[in-house]
Image (spheres, grey):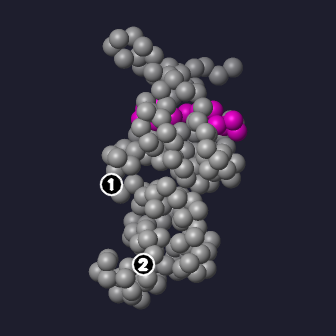
Amino acid sequence: MRGTHRAEAPDDGEASGAFPGPGLVELGGDGLLVLDRGARVLRGNALARGWLGARERLPLTTRQAREAFERRSGAFVLELERELVVVLRASARRYALEGAVAVAFLSDPAQRPEGLRAVLRSLWDLTIVESRVTELAAQGRSPAEIGEALSIARSTVHVHLRSIYRKTGVRRHYELVAKVWRSLPRWL
């Protein structure tokens, strides 16, 4: 039977939630959770544990959240005491725990003005520039307008777009826009 690691209690003696095993690395403003098939938290860093409080499962209260969890890929907004953005990925080997099926990255957009770009980078492994290009494309900008906004040549925009298409599994500009809108409608 697995032991339970309880987050250190605040000075007033109230426990802030139970999570099995030791915590995970702190990600500089992002929460990190490792989840099982039932969205139960197997491991979590201190920030994520703080945001979840005493909850032992990641709340999947919306259709978008449930679908993202079923696919083990996607993003959704989670309403707790504050609005958080959750990006789900299939569990990677480095988080290999018995029963782990997904890793959730939690971000507070109010604390991170580049929140959308961080979500895009996490969701599709985009570079910083690729996430900026994707954000502008999702806003309906053409490659020429993206180049002007980022002060780069149109041909450079096309190089980035080809890489983005490969990483997101699309072939055309309009498919990229549709995929971003389907994945992250709340952000746009």
Indicate whether 181 appears above or below 45: below
The spot of residue 174 in percent (x, y) is: 56, 78
Q: From which residue to which does the magenta span run?
A: 35-49
**In the rendered image of this protein, does residue 70 appear above or below residue 57?**
below
Where residue 60 is drawn, which disc sits there? none
Where in the figure is residue 35, as x and y percent of width and height?
A: 62, 38
- Mark 2 sits on what residue? 141
Q: Is residue 36 above or below residue 87?
A: above
Q: Position of residue 62 (x, y in %)?
A: 61, 44
Callout 2–callout 1 Cβ contact below 8 Å: no
Name the image quarter holding the N terminus. top right
Question: What count of labels does the image hold?
Answer: 2
Image-quadrant location for residue 27: top left
Q: Secondary structure at mark 2?
A: loop
State the residue at coordinates (34%, 50%): 112
- Among the two numbered marks 2 and 1 on one chain, the one whose residue lies closer to the N terminus: 1
Mark 2 Cα-neighbour bin, 10 Å: few <14, some 14–19, many ≥20: some
Is residue 44 highlighted in magenta? Answer: yes
Residue 23 visible in this rendered orientation of the protein: no
Q: Residue shown at 32%/77% (left/top)?
A: 150
From the top left corner, tell me how far across and down residue 44 is, in percent. 51, 34
Q: Amino acid at mark 2?
A: Arg
Q: Quadrant of residue 144?
A: bottom left
At 49% from the left and 55% from the top, the residue drawn is: 186
Name the foreground residue: 45 vs 60. Answer: 60
Residue at coordinates 37% horizontally, 44% vertically from top-left?
29
Q: Is residue 180 left or right of residue 131?
A: right
Residue 112 visible in the snapshot? yes
Residue topped by disc 1: 113
Could you tell me the amino acid type at mark 1? Answer: Pro
